[in-house]
Structure formats: C-alpha cells, structure tokens
Image: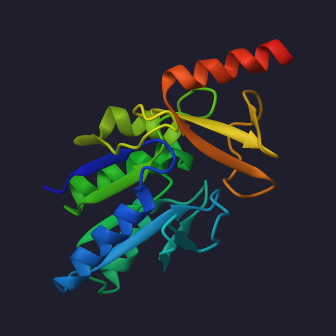
Amino acid sequence: MGKLYFRYGAMNSGKSTSLMQVAHNYEERGMKVVIIKPGTDKKGGNTLVSRLGVVRKVDFMIDSQDNIFQCVKECINKGRKIDCILADEVQFFKKHHIDELFKIAVILDIPVICYGLRTDFMMNGFEGSERLLLLAHSVEEMKTICTCGRKAILNGRKINGKYVFHGEQVAIDHVDNVEYQSLCGQCYYKLLEKDNENA
C-alpha cells in the first residue's frame, strides 16, 4: 500500500530542496514522479524555486476546485506511469485536496510525499497542514535554526523589513515586500512583545 507522508518545517528548513532531491533519486532509478503545488503559491509561477537556486517545473498547479485524485487517475488511464507524487507548499491546499492525496496513496497505491509549513506567522494552523497531521501515515519534522542558534519552530513575517503579527494568513515570500524568518519560540515572543510595546 502506498503511504501519505508529511514533511514539515519552518521557513528555510530545505523543504523544496529536499523535494527536488527526492525527485532526482526516483528519476535516477528510471522511475516517474509527478510534482504538484497549489496555485496560491505565486512564487516562481509554475516552477519550484529552492533557496539554493535550484529550479524545477511542476507538472500541475492545483486550484481550490481541482480534484487531484481525478487528475492523477486520468493521467494513469492515458498510460502515464506514476511511481510517486511530490507536493510542495501543501499548507495552501484545501482539506479536500489532502483527502484526495490520501485516497491516491491508499486506493491507487502511489506514495505521496508532501512538504510544507505546519503553522503561519501568527502560530495558527493551515487548513492543509492540519488535515495532513490527522491523515498522514508518517509525519517528519525538517529542522532548521533561529538566528540565535536555537532550533526554529515558528515563522516570523516581515513587511518592508519590520516584523508583523497581524494580517491575512497567506502572503507569499518575496512578493509585495514580504519575507519570512524562521524563529525559535523565545525569539518569536521577544519580537511579539516589542511589537505590542510599539503598538
């Protein structure tokens, strides 16, 4: 039986780079992968862009109304071989998308490896990530460090270089002067306290 995997980590933990390495490993052995990402993720358009500068075209951009299970089933019916599905930025997927990925793993017997964030910049869960934490056969943390040297588990949002703690849940990295910094809990709360003092 195929399995659904969720590999999560704070910003800069190497998720997209790891996904592309996994794709390379499969292809080096003559196997076929399908790479998907949500249409919400405007960074790089129809490509994955890692912070190391590696770029790769995705096979499918998934919009909110799309059915991933049907999309994959149609590909198989047309004779396309699929050995693994790799999904990036899964936090932006809807609950039904995660259910469809689970169904691909258990019904179509294709392993599905998902990469994404667990929480947003306000420490709230994303719809896709919350569903994955409930359904994934395997959950693995990808680690990175805060600027202080501690393990980073949170994501700080900066707009025009200033940390912010309120706003829309979705704002894409390096679009409209938005950037993210991986933070440990201690540094996150220090910055939050400073923001509250200046409010």
Kindly give the residue lying farthest to the left in the view shown. Answer: 1
Residue at 65% in and 64% down: 43
Q: Is residue 126 left or right of residue 138?
A: right
Quadrant of the drawing holding the N terminus: bottom left
Between 181 and 3, the one lying in front of the other is 181
Front in this rendered view, residue 193 or 116: 193
**Which x, y percent locates residue 184?**
49, 29
| Callout count | 0
Q: Is residue 64 above or below residue 186?
A: below
Q: Position of residue 123 (x, y in %)?
A: 57, 26
Eyeballing the image, is 169 above or below 41? above
Q: Quadrant of residue 165?
A: top right
Taking 183 as reference, is 82 left or right? left
Which residue ends up furthest to the front in the rendered image?
A: 148
Q: Is residue 54 above or below residue 160?
A: below
150 displayed left or right of 183: left
Percent position of residue 7, x then y: 34, 47
Q: Pick the residue in front: 137 or 7.
A: 7
- Residue 13 drawn at (x, y percent): 42, 49
Residue at 63% across, 19% down = 190
Look at 46% across and 37% down and name the residue there. 118
Position of the C terminus, as image quadrant, is top right
Residue 18 against residue 139 in the figure, above or below:
below
Look at 77% across and 32% down and name the residue there.
Answer: 167
Structure colour scheme: rainbow
Classify residue 30 by image quadrant. Answer: bottom left
